[in-house]
């Protein structure tokens, strides 16, 4: 029997689902961070695997730990140097379907403005329709979509965008082969060249020291005035103040933002998503980091997590390894 510990509500809420999906013998336990260091430290002593979105430098000893499995794709809250020797850290994806559909919806909604048309029509306004030869709306066909990142999400967005006859250009730190649905692929050093070509810019790259604040005031000034930015990655990739000013002053036309600079906490459950009032800008569509949050995503992710736990129990290679297991000697080496 192996022991897996699901930390905090994000993971713990799916304990029963995990039990149903496992095919090997695991004892599944849950633990809230509010339970304190005593129960937490005791539980880690016997854990073979932990499912968590965070693993920091002050974690208690975990001598049996062989797998830290994230239930999400991002790992900016996991410190490689904190991972115990002999333990592997893996993440999980499975969100590219949901996020890429959200991106297509965002572009269509920006062009058509269906929600606005519905509201005005309910109030008796026929403007925007053929019946009164009103104003027209846009099309995606022929527009240029720029992608920052060609990982799973970027590639899924590109495939769907080509179905709408868009031109797709991308910059990536990892060159990809067989990219028939990408018209031009360049290195991250070509970002400044790509930006002025785009009608829509979708941010799908991971947050790192290299990408933090990558889209700043200088780069926003390179963009077309009618550019629409869609961020489904991490908010901090776009400089917070520079983005707000660019939207407020119409340096760019607008944005659809699903990721934020501040999130709710138990102490502040209704926290504002930014220190700047994006909510006051009519050219911003704001959502609650929901682009990936579908029923299909949840089932796919926990099926993958169960599969990785089964692999560990059977001694098989793990999947989606982000940080490979280190030997005790490697763990003691200075970084």
Image (cartoon, rainbow, N blue to C red):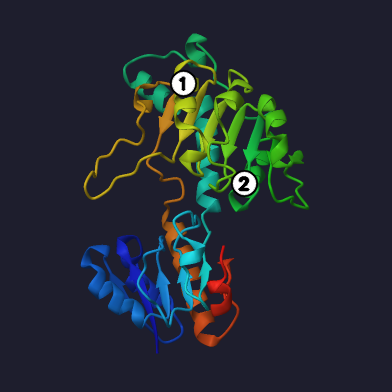
Tell which of 228 and 132 is nearer to you: 228
Reading the image, the residue beneath label 2 is 154
- Residue 177 seen anywhere in this rendered image of the structure: yes
Secondary structure beneath disc 1?
helix
- Decide which of 275, 51 is in the foreground and name it: 275
Quadrant hosting residue 271: top left
Label 2 secondary element: helix
Direction bottom: furthest residue: 1
Q: Residue at x 58, y 71 (%)?
A: 324
Left/right of residue 35 with respect to residue 76 in the rendered view: left
Decide: is 16 above or below 120: below
Question: Could you say where residue 198 lies in the image, as x and y percent from the top left?
Answer: 65, 28
Q: Residues within 10 Å of mark 1 (few under 14, many from 20)?
A: some
Is there any visible trace of residue 327 in the rendered image? no
Using the image, tell me which numbered label, if any, was put on residue 245: 1
Q: Position of residue 156 (x, y in %)?
A: 62, 49
Residue at 69%, 26% (x, y): give it: 197
Q: Is residue 221 left or right of residue 37?
A: right
């Amino acid at each position: 029997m192996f022991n897996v510990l699901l930390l905090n509500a994000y993971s713990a809420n799916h304990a029963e689902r995990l039990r149903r999906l496992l095919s090997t013998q695991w004892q599944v336990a849950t633990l809230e961070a509010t339970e304190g260091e005593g129960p937490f430290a005791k539980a880690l002593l016997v854990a073979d695997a932990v499912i968590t979105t965070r693993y920091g430098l002050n974690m208690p000893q975990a001598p049996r730990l062989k797998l830290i499995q994230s239930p999400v794709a991002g790992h900016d809250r996991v410190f490689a140097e904190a991972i115990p020797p002999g333990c592997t850290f893996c993440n999980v994806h499975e969100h590219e379907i949901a996020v890429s559909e959200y991106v297509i919806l965002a572009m269509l909604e920006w062009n058509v403005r269906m929600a606005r048309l519905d509201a005005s029509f309910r109030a008796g306004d026929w403007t925007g329709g053929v019946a009164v030869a009103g104003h027209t709306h846009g099309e995606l066909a022929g527009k240029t979509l720029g992608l920052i990142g060609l990982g799973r999400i970027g590639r899924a967005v590109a495939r769907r965008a080509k179905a709408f006859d868009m031109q797709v250009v991308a910059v990536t730190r990892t060159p990809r082969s067989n990219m028939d649905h990408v018209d031009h692929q360049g290195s991250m050093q070509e970002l400044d060249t790509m930006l002025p070509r785009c009608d829509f810019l979708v941010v799908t790259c991971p947050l790192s020291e290299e990408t933090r604040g990558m889209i700043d005031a200088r780069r926003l000034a390179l963009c077309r005035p009618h550019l629409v930015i869609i961020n489904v990655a991490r908010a901090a990739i776009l400089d917070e103040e520079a983005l707000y000013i660019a939207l407020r002053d119409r340096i760019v036309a607008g944005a659809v933002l699903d990721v934020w600079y501040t999130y709710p906490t138990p102490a502040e459950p209704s926290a504002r998503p930014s220190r700047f009032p994006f909510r006051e800008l009519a050219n911003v569509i704001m959502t609650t980091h929901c682009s990936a949050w579908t029923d299909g995503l949840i089932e796919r992710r926990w099926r993958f997590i169960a599969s990785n736990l089964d692999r560990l129990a059977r001694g098989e290679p793990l999947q989606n390894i982000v940080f490979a297991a280190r030997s005790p000697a490697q763990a003691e080496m200075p970084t």
